[in-house]
Amino acid sequence: MKTVLPDTQQSLAQWVSQATGINTFGVKIRLLGNDLHILCEAVECPQRWQMLSDLLRALQQTDLDALTKANQVGETQNREQPSIYQVFVYGRKKGEQRPRWCHRVYLNQIDRHLEQVEKALVKVNRSQIEPGGALIVSNESLARQGKPEAIARYLSETLSPLGIDVQVKVRPHKSRFSQNPDNFRLWVFCQSAYSPDPQLIAEPVAAKLRHLNLTGYGDAIIANQVQGESKPDWLLRIDLTPPERMLKEWSRWGDVQAISRLLAQELSTLQAKVTVTLKDTTLHIFCSPASSVNPTYVPPKQRCLEIIGKFLESIAPQAITAATVYGQTQAVNDTPTWIDWLSLPAKEHPALAQPVLELASCGDEPAILFLIERLLNPNLDWRLKTGGIRVLLSRRGDLLHIMCDAPICPQRKQVVHPISKLIRELRIPGIAGIRIYGRRAGSKEPFWNYGTDFQARDVIVPEPTPEFAATSAYVQELLPTDNAEATIRPDLTKEDLQTFVTTTIRAIGDRIRQFLLSSQLFAESLTPGQTTYPSSNYLTLLVWGTLGILLTVQADWLFHYVITQTKPNTPLTQVTSPPPPPPTNNPDQFTTNSPSAEFNASGFTTTNPPRGNGTATAILLAARSPIPTFNARQLDEQLALYKQRLQEWGNPPDVLIIGSSRALRGVDPDALAKSLKNQGYSQLNIFNFGINGATAQVVDFILRQVLAQEELPKMIIWADGARAFNSGRDDLTFNAIAASPGYQYVIEQAIKRNQGEQTSDTAELTSQPAKNHSNSYQIANNWLNERFSNLFATYPHRQELKRLITDQIKFFPGLGANNPASNSPDSPLAANQTVDFDGFLALSDRFNPSTYYQKHPRVPGNYDNDYKSFLLSGQQDAALQAILQFANTQKISLVFVNMPLSNEYLDQYRTIHEQEFQQYMLQIASENSHFIFRDLSLLFPTQNQFFSDPSHLNQYGAYEVSKKLATDPMIPWKIKQRESGIGSRESGKKSQGI
């Protein structure tokens, strides 16, 4: 029965047959990884050197890669054939099971192979002597030069037998998180028909790459991808730090084995063998002959002391103050021929004399890191060969988080007990427990975790993996950028782009000019040599100007008549919302504890939970408030509601949620309090102070100026995202507040509280540009209002006119739905969008892209004003720093939550800035121990049912986020119930009606 070969193999078999003269039935082809295997058989075994000579000459004139790719058909057209690096040629007699000979051909050295074969043919014809031939350079020798193609050929020797083809690329690698001077990263792209177990290739590939001793490379990333898939199924990181640098890092801490290895390298030129021991703080170094050829040889004293002294001076080993150097013959028990002593830097510098264990016991993280790594890597040869187990530390509160990763994930039983014993014996101040994690190097998430506490702790919920473990510094840079680079035209220059833009703008301008001239409302401007207008132009200006004035006057009269006829008898400022119900003794009027009321049949929270209409109450409270308006209606109402809450409870809330509309809609105080209660905490008082459009400046103003010290909470949950920190865009919300009478009132009150002496806070506020122009702005605005009121009868009623036009527009198809103001996420709340008495806005709308974009425009990130001129340094960063300092002074726990976003919102432009913002916040968190950053931006990017629009959560998403925060132990939920007679949450709510 004959076997039908694929077209590619048929083509290769025909090519081999033509080159060697062997019948195609005697040629078998197999492509395995990057290796091409050719088996040739005949009635008599083919002559090795003659057949190789014919085949090599054909290879000189043939591109094997082009030959295989040109014959792809069917499914093979959808994937790229691997490059061929080497060819294995076999010869055997028909009927035999094993080849009689095998020859490997490196395709990058065909000329050398051909020279070798030609010499072999001559010798075989004379005396059957095996060839000396040309010197064939191994792939390893070429790979040591750092060339990507040579490294790929070198790795294919190990991976091709497994059916894995290899491609290697080199890319620049710059990371502000790494102090490694090597600025290149080696990418090894593997492709196969299956997904091999990373443990199968991790250590062999790591050993081969590290054996090359490549310079200029910090690490290598192996990305394995199954043929036909679009993304790698796993990544593996290999540390390419040179062995010499690894040894120096440990030698710096006084590791005897590392010092012995380095000294042996230094004294190799003297043919000396080194033995090193440590007693107390003195290093004993024995120098003896390296070989037994001359057993009486003694290494020269002066030269040995010079090399050893210079080396020990450069590394300055920790806690080693002196070294005793001996010179002796090869006999072990022989008396030393010479002896001398050296003083080391630790004797003169007290900081270097302190033992490593003492440093670690005091909390020195580099010392702790060395002790753990040395403990986990007892076999120095294995560490230098594969990179060993790498350790990352992160201290959060009273917990020490320890991440262990290696090419093969460290076994839990291998690392847990030794680390736990070491940390327990160190008795580090402030450390009450440890959390240990293990993962494969290059993985994003840990494979296992372990935790133990050395003493009793208040937290009763499990701690999650800290930020360093989930988003390590190098993991953030593992994603390749080939796709982004491929979309850029290499032939498109800046001059071409500028010419295109200029031509387009000029063409649009010419069309607009012709349209305006054709309307006869406009005339040509003066030419360069013309000094006066024609008389016809003066007449045109006079006629159209008169008509324009008459039309304006008539329109003013008409609008005034319409407004006066349609104006209601009640004044515009009267509250049209129904008044809230009177107080009742039924606590379920606002909340319910019934399980059936909390979830509906679909598993989501009920659409309209009976929490009461806080907006109507807030409007009345704001109208009665002695504080003038802040030019932001929602800020006025939220502040009034918050003041009412303070009166009802007698104390500020335990937790204050603050931020923009993403906080207003995204964190449910009631759900958060219930979830915390289920975790074992007492009933907490939580309030949502979210303000539409609030930036870092607005939050800073509210916390440090609007709220008095006795009105501040013990914990602040700041829920927002990157756009609240963009200093490159105009901060319209804060500018409007800064020009308001409420802003001026707050500053005056702050000055009065400080008895006429401006504090740094008030001085800072009064020096802002918005404040400097507020008076002139108000004067100019009042003057214009007065003049226009005298000239136009409609001007005093412009708000009624605006409302009338808006109400009429919505009846025209396509106009009302596309009104940007009505659809803005940060626009004022509609009548059916009311906050509850906790300040939370619960929206039941569910985001559906197929219907949402029929009513709302799809705005790409590069046209989004929120990301305009994106800049994280500026006035918003200054506001954040002020908040951090203020929270630290007031001993307020500050937690920032990066709120969830949908994939519909996170396009490429926004994703880049979101990643930049995450790195910025992680850096801030690492520098401020009282500030905690939690990144929930990708909590549910594809679950649109949790969003009301692409970037805002609905009440269902807010419920999930609130539960997530309640079970997050990185947030210090250590708020004690105040002892000032606070009632229950329900009893406090039932008296909030007015």
Image (cartoon, rainbow, N blue to C red):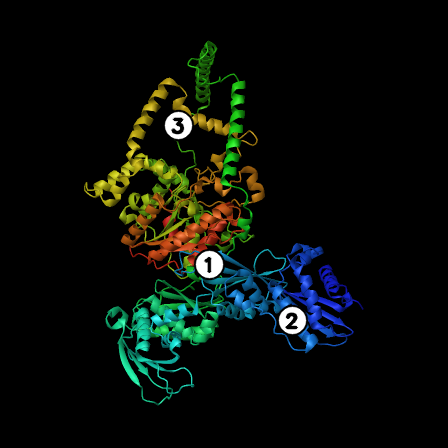
Residue 2, numbered circle: none
Q: Is residue 540 above or below residue 743?
A: above
- Which residue corresponds to mark 2? 119
> Which of the two labelled residues, at mark 2 and mark 3, occupies the earlier sequence position?
2
Quadrant position of the N terminus in the picture = bottom right
Q: How many marks?
A: 3
Query: Callout 3 environment at 10 Å: few (<14), some (14 to 19), or many (20+)?
Result: few
Q: Which kind of residue does numbered mark 1 sit on?
A: Phe
| Residue 188 appears in the rendering | no
Q: Nearer the viewer, mark 2 or mark 1?
A: 2
Query: Callout 2 environment at 10 Å: few (<14), some (14 to 19), or many (20+)?
Result: some
> Which of the two labelled residues, at mark 3 and mark 1, occupies the earlier sequence position?
1
Between the residue at mark 2 and the residue at mark 1, the CA separation in whole angstroms equals: 43 Å
Asked which quadrant contains residue 581, the reply is top left
Q: Nearer the viewer, mark 2 or mark 3?
A: 2
Horizontal and vertical percent for residue 627? Answer: 30, 37
Between the residue at mark 2 and the residue at mark 3, the CA separation in whole angstroms equals: 110 Å
Identified at 45% across, 75% down, the residue is: 381
Quadrant position of the C terminus in the picture = top left
- Disc 3, disc 1: CB below 8 Å? no
Q: Is residue 103 left or right of residue 402?
A: right
Between the residue at mark 3 and the residue at mark 1, the CA separation in whole angstroms equals: 71 Å
Identified at 52% across, 55% down, the residue is: 480
Q: Which kind of residue does numbered mark 3 sit on?
A: Pro
- Disc 2, disc 1: CB below 8 Å? no
- Which residue corresponds to mark 3? 571
Nearest the eye: 78 or 19: 19
- Which residue corresponds to mark 1? 184
> Which of the two labelled residues, at mark 2 and mark 1, occupies the earlier sequence position?
2
Query: Callout 1 environment at 10 Å: few (<14), some (14 to 19), or many (20+)?
Result: some
